[in-house]
Image (cartoon, rainbow, N blue to C red):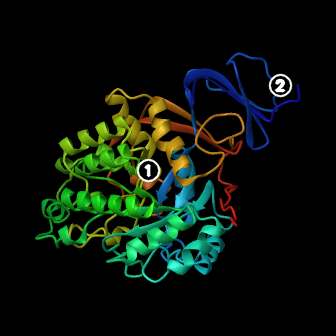
Amino acid sequence: MTPFDLVVRSRRTVTPEGERAAAVAVRGEKIAALYDYAAPLPAAEEVDLRDLVLLPGLVDTHVHVNEPGRTHWEGFDSATRAAAAGGVTTIVDMPLNSLPPTVSCDALDAKLRAAAGKCHVDVAFWGGAVPGNVKDLAPLHGRGVRGFKCFMSPSGVEEFPPLAGGELRLALEEVAGFGGLMIVHAEDPELLAEPQGPGYAAFLASRPGASERSAVARLVRLAEETGCRVHVLHVSSAECLEVLEAAQARGVPVSAETCPHYLTLAAEQVPEGGTAYKCCPPIRSESNRDLLWDGLRRGVLSCVVSDHSPSTAELKVPDFAAAWGGIASLQLGLTAVWTEAARRGHGLADVARWMSAAPAALAGIPGKGGIAAGNDADLVAFDPAADTLVDAARLHHRNPVTPYHGRTLKGAVLTTWLRGRPVDGRPHGRPILEARA
């Protein structure tokens, strides 16, 4: 037998079929085969994790890298370092809050220049759908973006306005025409208001769950009428679940995600002035959180992704009406979700499905999302029993702001391999772009 480049053994290897004892044999950048745990295999390098867990590299399809233009908020080097430290081997970069936003091929080229030589994990890209750029969507699709992000309410940055009136239908019709995907920030602007005070209760009241439900209902109708495949981003309100489940039962091409902060944090926990917790849509009640977990269990929500949307500490002023809205959590998603998932009786195979397989399938990224022969050798050695005390200053995120600071989370990432090589501080991530006719 020709020697393998790497063999990683674990009695707890998480595969698409479930957890098993296995030896994962790697040749070049790919998983060549899975063998029995104790199988004798010739290899240039061998790692035996024994009873530690071997996970597939996570795929985070909701990351705001912010470079170019707002690199002081985050950038490709710091974001992808954080990703690797958290067991994430592939990210998909959002088209905002970079300058320019990724709404044209020229803007995509600017993004690629900014990322060159800086990425510690593989990086794919979303395009943006904004008023006036319908003509740019097909060319961006042809360049290999994974789909298109749009807002139904103001985005928070003036250079990325929402699709209002009939503009959303026009964009959906265009994307449906070439078989693309639209991913949507779904809040109804008619049901949003300015917070009537600086505290969290006032902010939460200004963005009620009904605004999400109303927007999702409209999006579902448009998806049915246009045939466009749509995905609802960062579902925070359980009021959306009934609408989504009914649509999925009818065969409407709609999927949805939620985020670690909605599954692990709750409005009752937000401290006074704790604007590290501010995001849009907002973190809601403990009872709402329980219902989101149930939606995830039933498959109404298929993906758990970070919506990593960092900023400088100066923008997180202790006033919920004025502070920047975004959660920094890229490095912490796995441990945060595992902490709560384990408490609720879920296994690591569930976590791998929500955080690796389903996001990879959503974005159509070949070779990612599972420990299987032929896939990229994206692997994570994970200690599920370790306790990790979060210190924001020790994270790889560019700015030390996160609502998880001071919390003890369950689990620790020990080693991350990207395409068969350990992530060791020397960038070897690459862009994922596939030209389409």
- State the residue at coordinates (33%, 72%): 314
Q: Position of residue 430 (x, y in %)?
A: 68, 59
Residue 39 position (above or below residue 363):
above
- Which residue is label 1 attached to? 305
Answer left or right for 264 relative to 18: left
Along the polypeptide, which appears first: circle 2 or circle 1? 2
Nearer to the camera, 395 or 356: 356
Q: Assess whether mark 1 and mark 2 are in contact (beta carbons under 8 angstroms).
A: no
Please give the residue where the numbered disc 2 appears in the rendered image: 42
Q: Which sits in the foreground, 418 or 236? A: 236
| Residue sitting nearer the eye, 379 or 107 | 107
- Residue 405 visible, this angle: no
The kind of residue on which mark 1 rests is Val
Q: Quadrant of the N terminus?
A: top right
Residue 342 x/y as whole percent: 37, 29
Please name the amino acid that badge 2 sits on. Answer: Pro
Closer-to-camera residue (366/49):
366
Q: Position of residue 74 (x, y in %)?
A: 48, 66
Q: Residue furthest right?
A: 2
- How packed mark 1 is, by other alpha carbons closer than 10 Å (few <14, some 14-19, many 20 or more), is many
Determine whether, in the image, residue 323 is placed left or right of residue 331.
left
Cα distance between the residues tagged 2 and 1:
37 Å
Q: Secondary structure at mark 2?
A: loop
How many marks can you see? Answer: 2
**Mark 1 residue element:** loop
Q: Nearer the viewer, mark 2 or mark 1?
A: 1
Q: Quadrant of the C terminus?
A: bottom right
Seen from this angle, which residue lies furthest left? 196
